[in-house]
Image: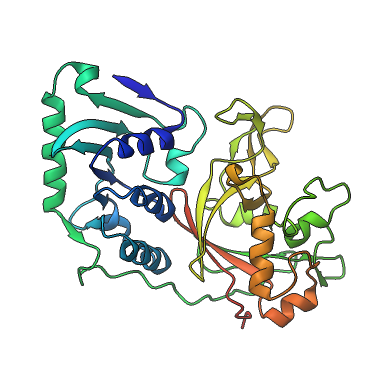
């Protein structure tokens, strides 16, 4: 058996390209990973295993339907009678199961692009084990899952509606309005001065690229990030979790970023992002084994565009120049001075920047 703990996405894509059919069963997913596999063009069936337990948020469902409609070779199914937390990737050739990957990694950017040893997939095939008995068992398992799954177009699939945002009155020392939902955080794009007046960051937040000595001189827009305050860490522990203080990328370089996550915006835009930076060391500053993130920004390192992708996106939504320094006046004119970030499932979030002001 081959035990894989690194470059899992690459292994999944390589196996897909060498097959003529693929079946994937995982508890959770991210739409961008499903889209990338479907682009290869071979028949692809994906089973969302935790629908029966966790259902599906409407923004995620809408994105999946859009992707499903784009590919004739794609068939999305939801397990609805029980929870299935399996992570199983099955690769076929001439109707015969020839290779399989099983382990801990979900079919998501977060699951397949995590740092080394965060997730594991074990490769099982005839060449590895000199026996095909386990392959037949895995094939039977996939058929059992088929019996308890329904198609994405089935009327029994009912997306969860997002509850209307109800903001609670802030306590005197609080800087962040309470969303009323432990899985949804209001992320201000401004800071509050000592007099309680709102002002945008001169060289941070949406204006990150405005700092002196900024090295991203070849970007096509000003870099941006979504600030994470210590107040967010206290109020929303499920959204903002710590990660190791000392981390290495899959290439062995030191990084201050978390594993990538997928964020679906309210307009359908899908973005790979990472939690970045550090604040509030655990268990102590002197012995920082874990740290909490201090910002969220674009995080697909392969593009080398960093926070400029987020900066360009936000400015396009606001209808201002890609290098415009955003002010409070701009945010008021747009109609919203915050982003509503919601946790959906491991490695998957939604973000609302719809221009609707707080009531």
- Which percent across, then down, holds residue 71? 31, 59
- Which percent across, then down, holds residue 357? 63, 80
**For residue 233, above or below residue 287:** below
Q: Is residue 177 visible?
A: no
**Residue depicted at x 67% and y 51%:** 295
Q: Is residue 209 visible?
A: yes
- Which percent across, then down, holds residue 332? 73, 80
Which quadrant of the structure image shows residue 122? Answer: top left
Is residue 38 rendered to the left or right of residue 337? left
**For residue 281, above or below residue 73:** above
**Image quadrant where one finds the N terminus:** top left
Which quadrant of the structure image shows residue 232? Answer: bottom right
Which quadrant of the structure image shows residue 65? Answer: bottom left
**For residue 40, above or below residue 339:** above
Is residue 224 rendered to the left or right of residue 22? right
**Residue depicted at x 62% and y 79%:** 358
**Image quadrant where one finds the C terminus:** bottom right
**Residue depicted at x 67% and y 63%:** 312
Judge by depth and name the residue closer to the eye, 337 or 35: 35
Judge by depth and name the residue closer to the eye, 334 or 289: 334
- Which percent across, then down, holds residue 22? 25, 43
**For residue 123, above or below residue 227:** above
**Residue depicted at x 49% and y 37%:** 114
* Colouring rule applied to residues: rainbow
| Residue farthest toward the top in the current orientation of the protein | 130
Is residue 9 rendered to the left or right of residue 27? right
Badge count:
0
Is residue 8 rendered to the left or right of residue 232? left
């Amino acid at each position: 058996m081959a035990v894989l703990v690194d470059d899992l996405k690459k292994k999944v894509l390589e196996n897909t390209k060498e097959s003529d059919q693929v079946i994937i069963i995982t508890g959770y997913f991210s739409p961008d990973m499903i889209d990338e596999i479907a682009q290869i063009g071979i028949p692809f069936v994906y089973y969302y295993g935790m629908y029966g337990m966790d259902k599906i948020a409407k923004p995620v469902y809408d994105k999946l339907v859009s992707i499903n409609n784009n590919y004739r070779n794609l068939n999305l199914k939801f397990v609805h009678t029980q929870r299935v937390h399996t992570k199983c990737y099955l690769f076929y050739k001439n109707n015969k199961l020839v290779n399989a990957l099983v382990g801990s990694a979900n079919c998501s950017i977060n699951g397949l692009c995590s740092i080394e040893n965060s997730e594991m997939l074990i490769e099982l095939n005839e060449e590895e084990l000199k026996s095909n008995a386990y392959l037949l068992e895995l094939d039977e398992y996939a058929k059992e899952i088929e019996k308890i799954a329904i198609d994405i177009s089935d009327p029994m699939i009912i997306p969860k509606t997002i509850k209307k945002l109800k903001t609670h009155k802030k306590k005197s020392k609080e800087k962040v309005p309470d969303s009323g939902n432990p899985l949804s955080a209001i992320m201000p794009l401004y800071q509050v001065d000592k007099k309680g007046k709102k002002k945008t960051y001169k060289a941070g937040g949406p204006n990150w690229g405005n700092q002196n000595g900024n090295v991203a001189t070849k970007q096509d827009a000003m870099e941006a990030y979504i600030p994470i305050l210590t107040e967010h860490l206290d109020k929303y522990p499920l959204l903002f979790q710590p990660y190791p203080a000392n981390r290495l990328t899959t290439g062995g370089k030191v990084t201050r970023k978390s594993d990538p996550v997928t964020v679906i915006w309210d307009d359908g835009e899908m973005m790979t992002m990472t939690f970045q930076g550090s604040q509030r060391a655990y268990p102590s500053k002197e012995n920082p084994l874990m740290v909490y993130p201090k910002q969220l920004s674009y995080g697909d390192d392969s593009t080398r565009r960093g926070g400029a992708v987020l900066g360009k996106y936000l400015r396009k939504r606001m209808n201002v120049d890609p290098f415009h320094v955003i002010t409070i006046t701009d945010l008021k004119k747009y109609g919203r001075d915050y982003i509503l970030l919601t946790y959906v499932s491991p490695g998957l979030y939604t973000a609302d920047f719809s221009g609707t002001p707080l009531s």
